Image: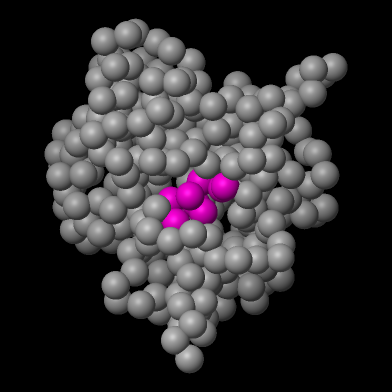
Amino acid sequence: MVERRVKRGIVIAAAAAATSVVMSISCGILSFGRFPWTPSFSRVAEGSPPPLPAHFPDVAIVSLDEQSLQSSEQPWPWPRGRFAEIVYRLEAAGAEVLAFSFDFSERRERRNDMAFARAIKQSRRVVLAAHRESRDGEGERVRLPAPEFWIGAAAIGHLLYDVDRDGIVRHGMRDHRIAAHALPSLSQAAVALALGQDPVPSDTRRFAIDYRWANTPIPSIPMDDVIQGRFDPGAVAGRIVFIGGTASRFQDVWTTPLGPNQPGLYIQALAARTLLAEYAAASQQTWR
């Protein structure tokens, strides 16, 4: 488990106190709806931002939740061949980009690892995560995906947030240097790949996540349903799909302006919507 450590306000998204995830059911697909928040937080998320252009992708989530872990006949960590199945099924359903937040830095059983590596290489739509690890007396180092995975990936992105002094995640990070590696965020890398454009020029590395996007539910499908083919392809078609763990064992929940216990995967999706809106605003200014 990557150690959680606050350093200059930056915290790695692979560690946090795990509790419950609040979700609602919509049209047979799990959708993160409006989360409960305190009145002091609610002002941040009132209303809705301007809609994205019709030709822009939206986001979706494939969640390794408690249900998916319990339904599996195999203990976690799963064989990597299962992730190959996920890639193939989501691509067949028309997903635009597949952004994995899991740590794939260690090699496991070779046959399954190579199956996943082939799926990544054939896809050309997969973004993988880099994780930061800090150890006493050793400084920090980056945990990149194993070479057989990252060599075929379309991009690599970090999972860092800029956490305010009060412990609330209000900002994402466009890019960050971990040890000797300068990396975009997972959401930035996924959005840039989906649009086929370089990041919007900015004077700052961090950006305010527009939590009003939480008022537009995000389709979220249990991972077991994807593996079994029990999902509506329309929930992912043309979308940037963030794939990761929301079960308590992953310890990836955060306090945001929406309230406590927000899954990191959900924050990545909201950050991606924020960046998509930023691209849209920049493109409108270009045509004026």
Q: Nearer the viewer, residue 114 or 50?
A: 114
Residue 17 found in image quarter: top right
Which residue is outermost to the bottom? 288
Asked if the magenta segment contains residue 287, the reply would be no
Q: Position of residue 27 (x, y in %)?
A: 22, 61
Q: Nearer the viewer, residue 36 or 173?
A: 173
Looking at the image, residue 116 sits to the left or right of residue 167; the answer is left
Looking at the image, residue 67 sits to the left or right of residue 231; the answer is right
Region in magenta: 184-192
Magenta stretch: helix, strand or loop mostly: helix
Q: Residue at x 46, y 78 (%)?
A: 283
Q: Residue at x 25, y 59 (%)?
A: 238
Q: Position of residue 41 (x, y in %)?
A: 67, 68
Asked if the magenta segment contains residue 188, the reply would be yes
Q: Residue at x 23, y 34 (%)?
A: 122
Residue 123 appears in the picture as rendered: yes
Q: Is residue 107 above or below residue 82?
A: above
Q: Position of residue 117 (x, y in %)?
A: 31, 24
Q: How many marks?
A: 0
Q: Is residue 135 above or below residue 266?
A: above
